[in-house]
Amino acid sequence: GAPVLRISWVEMLLPTLTTWVWPVRKSSTQLHRFCEEFKEKCSFCVPCGLQLADKTQTAVVRHFGLQILEHVIKFRWNNMPQQEKVQLKNCAMGLLSTGTYPILEEESHIKDVLSRIIVEMIKREWPQHWPDMLKEMEALTSVGEAQTELVMLILLRLAEDVITFRTLPTQRRRDIQQTLTQNMESIFSFLLAILQLHVDEYRKLAKAHCRVGVATLNTLAGYIDWVALANITNDNCRLLEMLCLLLSETELQLEAAECLLIAISRKGKLEDRKPLMVLFDDVAMHYILSAAQPVWAGVVERHYTFLKRLCQVLCALGSQLCSLGSDVEVEVPANLSKYTEAFLAFTTHPSQFLRSSTQITWGTLFRHEILSKDPVIIQMTIKYFRATMTNLVKTGFPSSNDSPSCEYSRHDFDSDEDFNSFFNSFRAQQGEVVRNACRIVPLEAFQIAAEWLQYQISAPIDIGTTVSKTAEGLCSILSPSVVQWDAMTFFTESVVGKIFKNVEDEKLPVDQGIELLQAVLNYNTQDPLILSCVLTNVSVLFPFVTHRPHFLPQVLYKVNTHLRSKAPRTRAVKNIRRHACSSIIKMSRDYPQFILPCFDMMYNHVKKLFSSEALLNMLEKCALMEALVLISNQFKDYNKQKQFLEELMATVAARWTSDEMRRVLWDPALFLDFVGADQLAAEGTEHTTGINRSRLSFCVYTILGVVKRARWPADLEEAKAGGFVVGYTPNGAPIYRNPCSAQVLALLPNLLALIRTLNSLFLPENICRLSETFSKAYDMIEVEKNMVLGLPQPALDIYDPPVYKTHLERMQGFFCTLYDNCYHTLGKAGLSLQQDFYTIEGLAEQIVGSAFVSLDNVPDHRLRTMLHILLSHYEEEEEDESCEENQEMLEEQLVRLLTREVLDLLSKSTLLGERSDYWDAGKEEMMSTESQAVAVSPAQPTGELTELGKCFLKHEDIYMTLLTISFTSLSWKDTSNCHRSASIVCWTLLRQVVGGNLLPEAVTWFYTSVLKGLQMHGQHEICNSALTQLALLMYENLRPRYMELRDVMTQIPDINLEALDQYDQRLLEPSSAQRLGEKKRKDQFKKLIAGAVGKALAQQFKKEVHIRNLPSLFKKPKPEKRDILETSECGALAALFSPALDDI
């Protein structure tokens, strides 16, 4: 009966599996369900699987048969009789030896599933019940190449499951890993012997042996990462030598480079890593250098991938050199020159990706205390500068064919935008390395920069094929001259900045610097893009002017020339004008004392520019005013500076405090009418209220600029002499007054009114007032959307379109900027005005009555601005790119950012020493996989409150709100928030009130919130660790006083109540003899709350695999505790000293 049943099952399955391979798959779901039910329910799975796996069947049928066997091992092994296990094992080994086609004919998925079957048995039975496994594998390799490859796949998958993915229970994993480690010397000898044998055969043009060689190298790669370094460096580094030799074998070089990279990248004790320096010897370096030589015409993908790995090998070798080079016992390699030449070859390779891959290592070499002084590195620094001159030129766009880099870029980047984003990062890397290299040879670097600058000044302008669309004869952003000027300017900027830090004053090349500056000032061009580079070079070379003050008027005149220009306001021209303003502010900020003698000249010039309202836009006016305020700080005379500020702000103050403006700022309806948001506007017509918006924005910009820039002298004696000090605090700190206080305080009531009105605009009755044209005026602008979504750098603007925005875009920009600037002004006021601001009568009520009005209606993207101000006024870096995005994704990301900033505000205001760069470390990425998260240790709470936090502690309602927010955030859909709250915030806040009279309901809610956090984020190891620690702290500190916590624990699914009672007993009886150590206590508690830990969605419906532990191989028996005086078989204490024991 049974054989007949088995045959009928096979007969049923064969047509089903045959049907499955046809393209028409209308019934594929039913077919899949049928096959899965067969694996689950059929009692003859093993014989059916073996019959289907016969190599006379088709590949699909064989694969399903092998899958059946794998399923049986994974899910039925524990209940199988021993005889059946042995029979299945023998059949599987038979399939390995005779059940496959030759190595070049067999399908890779058949090899894969066959190796999985063996590994699943090994995970359950080795070494205890299958001690000869390794010997059997070794014997299989003598059968043929196909079997040798299968053995390699088995050993590789075993290492991956045990070491990399850790898919076994702890004890089984420990047993297998320790057995592997004990046998590692013989395993490595076996692998090297196999590799040597098949490489020798491969050199006789035997393709099958090449496949075995590849499999062996892949297997080695799975072990090299974790075995003891001694196994890698055994036998005088024979493994490394073989890998270097294989770099010259075309079919094996990529896998050999992978192994070499893993070996060289190993961490560990410096003493253990010293043998790796053998790779700097002549033989190894010869093979590495030979492999790096270009031998292919065009880009061959496999060879290009190999070059990337070889470049990584050289980078890792450089890192090891720098690590070991700090050890006085390790000499600088004699072949350092060969190594750096090989490395330089990658830095000058046509591939932009390969060039960028070398930058970090160059930076490490140039920073190294010992190596940076070596003559080889000093000489190489000059060569690096020369290479960088080429590398900084933006060429190699995937869509172009104007450079050898283009073909490589088409392999590395999906679009020009991707390449552009990459190149901006690459250029920033190079700037950092150039600055490091300038410490070694600063004067030589300056000479190279000077030559390049002079060359560009003398070179004719080449506009190339892509010209500006707005004006004939002008360059585009990709014109050859523009990319050359841009690269040269960046290089000069990186070099000159370091000259003044690394060269003594008397050795500075002042004459040459002034000569360069004069050449730049005399250079004339009408091309806006090149003019922008010229302006940057003026700013870069400006420090030389401090040594030749008579050049200052020429510099200021050159910069101001661009503000007097009446050229059409294209985007490029606007950028030039903005650049000129930035240059003036930068010079005024960095060299105010030096520019002070020219103050009157600048002030008069600004007045002339202001006399014509059309000559400057409001941002340009504000920039010039800020520059004047910065220089006025050098008056060091309170009354003189106050008088100047009053004069400077007179027009703004008069307009801002006028009756008309007051009515507008205090009434939302009048405000909307004033700015024109309630009016219809046709595109192509001038919007008559634009001038109102401009003047209103100018007032707010001006107030912000003065508040931000006006200051008292940094030197206390100068501040006292100038009348800036009005008293001292009880601890002796001086109390300063700001010369702008009087003016700003007079303007503050209307600013607060404007903030209140802006918040009120989001009320339904005011939204209804918006006209159809401006119905979306409060929506996020594109720049904000892109910033929230984290989109990359802007798309390339090849044709420089004219600056034009729709009426709606202008209105959106107006509301966004006005809202931001109001809060920036309010945020700066406290720092700037100090006691003059905080002693305003009813200040708290005024702020609550303005900034905190109608918050329920204010959208999230506006609330973020307010939170930024409250977070010490830090500014985020904005990146914008024109693209479309899904609104739902945008809103979700915005909520995530907003909640993070709420937690930022809470933690920074209450916790002492809280880090401000918490989110910058890329926490989300660290939590994306469990294996990554394990490497990150959760931050420990300091337990200290700030002065403000202590103040909150005295107000129960405020403090309980902070606690509620903190514990609620544990279950927000944001792992970063959860980790930060659990590890830093929650317990620090809660422990302050643990000794108080917390209500049982509150304690229960707090504890339940932690368990909810575990349910939401427990699948992430880093969150699990922090939440478990928090739950443990709360339970151990609060359980003795609050019986209710036990009731919460009993509601955890699958909790062991007996274990809970034992835990409580030990906790409630501190003197108990059963008191456990901290680690055991944590482990027990973790088991108690395990039922609360949520699973990832992908794991929730997955059938669990259970692997039983075998008797442990390595557990040492504990010695019995006996009373030394106890009577024993040897006859009491005297027996210990009897002559009979002398032979022991």
Image: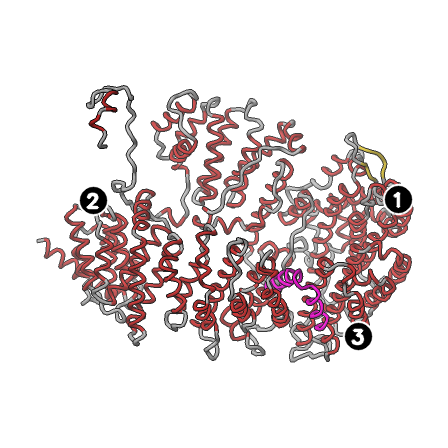
Residue with the most extreme left position: 1
Vertical placement of 71 versus 171: above or below?
below
Q: Is residue 356 visible?
A: yes
In x, y percent, where is residue 924?
51, 49
Judge left or right: residue 226 versus residue 875. Answer: left
Q: Is 898 situated above or below 491?
A: above
Q: Residue at x 70, y 68 (%)?
A: 489
Residue 192 is situated, as x and y percent measured from the top left of the image, at 32, 62
Query: For this rendering, which residue is in front, 869 or 1029?
Result: 1029
- Write down the residue under mark 2: 79
Would residue 1028 be counted in the magenta stretch? no
Whether residue 688 can be seen here: no
Whole-number angstrom distance, CA of label 1 to CA of label 2? 91 Å
Cβ–Cβ under 8 Å for marks 3 and 1: no
SS under mark 2: helix
The residue sitting at 49% across, 61% down in the picture is: 317
* Range covered by the magenta-colored residues: 424-452
| Residue type highlighted by circle 3 | Asn
Q: Earlier in the sequence, mark 3 or mark 2?
A: 2
Identify the residue position indicated by label 1 in the image: 638
Of residue 964 and residue 445, the one placed in the foreground of this image is 445
Residue tagged 3: 524
Q: How is the image coloured?
A: secondary structure
Q: Are marks 3 and 2 in contact (CB under 8 Å)?
A: no
Q: Position of residue 777 (x, y in %)?
A: 68, 55
Q: Is residue 740 left or right of residue 310?
A: right
